[in-house]
């Protein structure tokens, strides 16, 4: 983990922000390849990533504010302007709304557009989790004695564990899962499939990964012994799985 103490003159440079920028650059490159392969102007990909980035950041912050309203009221500036505290599912919703507007403006069918950006999204997630790990933004896991357990004494979010205590490095777990999902989607992108198949694969796989990893994270349960992220993940898994099953059934009937 790297102390979040970089500066250009008086301007602070957050480690998480650096990797967020790298994630956007990588996602833009991947999206451009898919736009071009599907017959669209690859230059549109950069605009698409900007739309998704702005929508995602706004959505992530709004979700965070609503999810922790009492804390937000006490210290609104720390919620809105610090480097940590992004909630991915809020970002996914905000990004989806922004991309809906973008697709409509450029005449791109929604499911086809979602397929083009799905690998880019999960690659961005993987790189973003590297930033979470290096900055220590509070999304580590429960205490563990496993040999790969880690401490986060320089975390941008307060580390309150005593010396010698280690926790699950869940950003690394998520990073590995998302890189694997990206590799799978990138390999499957040329397979003949109905529009939306790649996107629903993404929902199914990323939701399942987050659901499992959440068992060793520190988020409190809210219902049925599951955390808010797990409940949201189950919804994504259900939507993705049902849509993939429907497409498989449709293709079998058509054959």
Image (cartoon, rainbow, N blue to C red):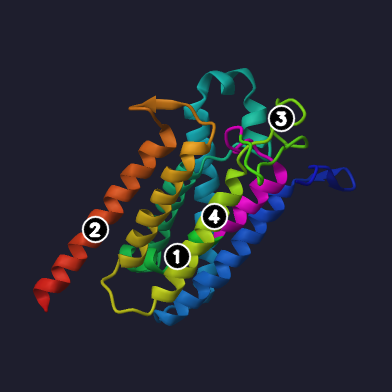
Question: Which residue is disc 1 drawn over?
Answer: 117
Q: Nearer the viewer, mark 4 or mark 1?
A: 4
Q: If you read the primary sequence from the N terminus, does the residue marked by circle 2 or circle 1 appear first?
A: 1
Report how far apart the C-alphas of labels 3 and 1 lie in the structure: 35 Å
Q: If you read the primary sequence from the N terminus, does the residue marked by circle 3 or circle 4 appear first?
A: 4
The residue at 43%/81% (across/down) is: 37
Q: Are marks 2 and 4 in contact (CB under 8 Å)?
A: no
Q: Which label is found at residue 59? A: none
Assess whether residue 30 is covered by the magenta stretch.
Answer: no
Task: Decide: few, some or many residues near mark 3? Use Cα within 10 Å; few <14, some 14-19, many ≥20.
Answer: some
Q: Residue furthest right?
A: 9
Q: Nearer the viewer, mark 2 or mark 3?
A: 3
The residue at 58%/44% (across/down) is: 170
Counting from the top left corner in percent of width and height, residue 69 is at: 51, 22
Question: Which residue is disc 2 drawn over?
Answer: 243
Secondary structure of the residue carrying tag 1 is: helix
Q: If you read the primary sequence from the N terminus, does the residue marked by circle 4 or circle 1 appear first?
A: 1
Q: If you read the primary sequence from the N terminus, does the residue marked by circle 2 or circle 3 appear first?
A: 3
Q: Nearer the viewer, mark 3 or mark 1?
A: 3
Q: If you read the primary sequence from the N terminus, does the residue marked by circle 2 or circle 4 appear first?
A: 4
Question: Which residue is disc 3 drawn over?
Answer: 159
Task: Decide: few, some or many residues near mark 4? Use Cα within 10 Å; few <14, some 14-19, many ≥20.
Answer: many
Q: Which label is found at residue 125? A: 4
Report how far apart the C-alphas of labels 2 and 1 lie in the structure: 18 Å
Q: Is residue 51 visible?
A: no
Report how far apart the C-alphas of labels 3 and 4 lie in the structure: 23 Å
Assess whether residue 131 is covered by the magenta stretch.
Answer: yes
Q: Residue furthest left?
A: 253
The residue at 41%/43% (across/down) is: 211
Q: Nearer the viewer, mark 2 or mark 1?
A: 2
Q: Nearer the viewer, residue 95 or 181?
A: 181
Q: If you read the primary sequence from the N terminus, does the residue marked by circle 3 or circle 1 appear first?
A: 1
């Amino acid at each position: 983990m790297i102390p979040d103490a970089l500066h250009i003159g008086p301007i602070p440079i957050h480690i998480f922000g650096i990797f967020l920028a790298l994630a956007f650059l990588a996602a833009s490159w991947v999206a451009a390849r898919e736009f071009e392969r599907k017959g669209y102007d690859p230059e549109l990909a950069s605009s698409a990533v900007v739309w998704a980035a702005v929508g995602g950041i706004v959505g992530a912050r709004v979700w965070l504010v609503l999810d922790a309203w009492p804390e937000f009221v006490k210290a609104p500036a720390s919620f809105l302007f610090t480097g940590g505290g992004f909630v991915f599912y809020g970002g996914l919703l905000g990004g989806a709304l922004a991309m809906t507007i973008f697709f409509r403006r450029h005449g791109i069918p929604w499911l086809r557009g979602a397929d083009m950006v799905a690998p880019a999204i999960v690659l961005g997630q993987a790189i973003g989790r590297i930033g979470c790990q290096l900055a220590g933004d509070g999304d580590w896991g429960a205490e563990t004695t496993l040999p790969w357990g880690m401490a986060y004494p320089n975390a941008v979010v307060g580390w309150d564990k005593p010396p010698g205590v280690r926790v699950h490095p869940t950003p690394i777990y998520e990073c590995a899962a998302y890189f694997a999902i990206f590799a799978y989607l990138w390999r499957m992108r040329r397979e003949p499939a109905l529009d939306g198949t790649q996107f629903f694969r993404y929902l199914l796989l990323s939701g399942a990964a987050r659901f499992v990893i959440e068992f060793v994270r520190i988020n409190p349960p809210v219902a049925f012994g599951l955390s808010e992220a797990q409940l949201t993940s189950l919804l994504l898994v259900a939507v993705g799985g049902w849509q993939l099953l429907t497409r498989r059934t449709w293709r079998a009937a058509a054959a």
